[in-house]
Image (cartoon, rainbow, N blue to C red):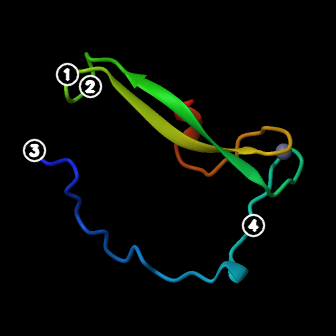
Amino acid sequence: MNMKKQKPLPKAQVQVDLKTAETMTCVECENKIFIQGYVVKRISAIVSPTGKEVIAPVQVFNCGNCGEMLNIGGEMDELI
Ligand SMILES: [Zn+2]
């Protein structure tokens, strides 16, 4: 089994004009600079598809000023 083989992502290389993109700000202090972090999930061997314990890092962003986590939507709250 070759894990490095990946399917090509369709339309992944779309050019985006960042000037028109929204700058996300901290909900607590309106800071615009975020630091990168990880929430690390441990999937027990019982529920893991491979039958082995899996460590799964989930990338999150924290406000560089107050540390509040950036809410990027989705299921982030449920994950943590
Ligand atoms: Zn903040």
Q: Quadrant of residue 80?
A: top right
Compute the Cα span from label 1 to label 2.
5 Å
- Left or right? Give the position of 57 relative to 33: left
What kind of element bears circle 1? loop
What kind of element bears circle 3? loop
Residue 72 place in picture, x, y as percent: 62, 52
Q: Which mark is residue 48?
A: 2
Are dots 1 and 2 in contact, CB under 8 Å?
Answer: yes
Q: Residues within 10 Å of mark 2 (few under 14, many from 20)?
A: few
Residue at 85%, 44% in the rendered image: 65
Q: Which residue is mark 1?
A: 51
Q: Which residue is mark 3?
A: 1
Residue at 25%, 16% in the rendered image: 46
Compute the Cα span from label 3 to label 1.
16 Å
Which kind of residue does numbered mark 2 sit on?
Ser
Q: Which residue is mark 4?
A: 23
